[in-house]
Amino acid sequence: MTAALIDGKAFAESLRGRVGELAAGFQAKAGRKAGLAVVLVGEDPASQVYVRNKGKQTVACGMASFEHKLPAETAEADLLALVERLNADPAVDGILVQLPLPPHVDEQKVIATINPDKDVDGFHVVNAGRLAVGQAGFVPCTPLGCVMLLRDRLGDLAGLEAVVIGRSNIVGKPMAQLLLAQSCTVTIAHSRTRDLPGVVRRADIVVAAAGRAEMVKADWIKPGATVIDVGINRVPAAEAGKTKLVGDVDFAGVSEVAGAITPVPGGVGPMTIAVLLRNTLVAAHRNAGLELAADAI
Ligand code: NAP
């Protein structure tokens, strides 16, 4: 392997450390803890693990965690009423509704009901709009985590060619907006892109967020490029009956060509919750009318 490993786990740990220090300062000034409410509907096992981890890490950072677990058959109106109560609750700075929601619930309607100033996931159209026009708002946690890793690795990103594979509202599109805001020259690729390997070969920065196991191959990569692998795919392991996690990038091959690369697991994944806590702390300062220096976290 010739590429440097981008250690998202270590970066996330240090980010949580900074959030913890600032959360203590917030509590001293505001007379209360910053608070994050997480709503889980149903019993999806992966979602249960995420919610448990979010709760644990929120408390470990010195913030208040409010968990609301509702049965899968919860009526949409009842979920919307809960979101309204959380919007009105002064102890709650951030609201996260764990997706996916059961099919009888309209996800967009639920997201639209969250107060944009408590929307620490950054999924509300108001926050998507703020990102597009360059106003302060909340940015989805995974792409913001990717930019933090890129800035940490490369410093100034201005003028670099960036190719984002994937155009979802939660990863690809905000990722492209963030890279544009960093003055990269940005291309968004998707399932209808012609000659994807040729497009990716132009890139100084590749962000793979397609949800396709090990799709990005070594001969797609410009030597020395920085590769951020957002994909999380469960595939059969060598041992019969077992599975393992792989990214969207063929790690073994690409790490012989790239300049730097995130592993899966241990790259982008750990950043998501750390950025969620960071966003919650920012929300708490705004809600309490307290200053938080733009470069504090
Ligand atoms: P998504 O909503 O399914 O979007 C996938 C995107 O990839 C779509 O825009 C799709 O194009 C594009 N795509 C699919 N196949 C392609 C191909 N063969 N060539 C080029 N583009 C292709 O997925 P998502 O929610 O953005 O998530 C993407 C991946 O990131 C998943 O593996 C997910 O598990 C992972 N993820 C990780 C984290 C984390 O680390 N914390 C967070 C979120 C997501 P079309 O639009 O044309 O269909």
Image: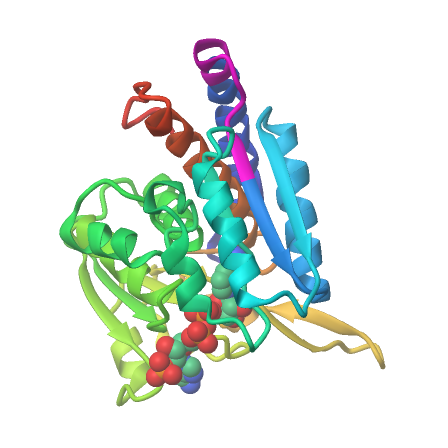
Q: Is residue 288 above or below residue 202?
A: above
Where residue 179 sits in the image (x, y, percent)? Answer: 24, 55
Which residue: 68% across, 68% down? 72
Is 234 left, or right, of 14 in this rendering?
A: right
Residue in the foreground of this view, choosing between 39 and 272: 39
Q: Is residue 171 magenta?
A: no
Residue 80 drawn above or below residue 196: above
Q: Looking at the image, what colour scheme do you see?
A: rainbow
Q: Nearer the viewer, residue 96 or 75?
A: 75
Query: Is residue 210 visible in the rendered structure shown here?
Result: no
Q: What residue appears at the point 54 percent right and 24 percent down from the top-left corner? A: 20
Q: Percent position (x, y) of residue 165?
A: 35, 73
Up the image or down, 285 lies above or below 147; here it is above
Name the quadrant of the C terminus: top left
In the displayed orientation, state which residue is furthest to the top.
28
Quarter assignment of residue 45: bottom right
Q: Would residue 226 be found to the left or right of residue 203 on screen?
A: right
- Ligand 1 image-quadrant field: bottom left
Q: Please state the extent of the stretch shown in magenta in the rendering.
A: 26-36
Q: Position of residue 208 (x, y in %)?
A: 41, 68
Q: Position of residue 129 (x, y in %)?
A: 21, 56
Q: Is residue 266 visible?
A: yes
Q: Quadrant of the N terminus?
A: bottom right
Residue 31: within the magenta?
Answer: yes
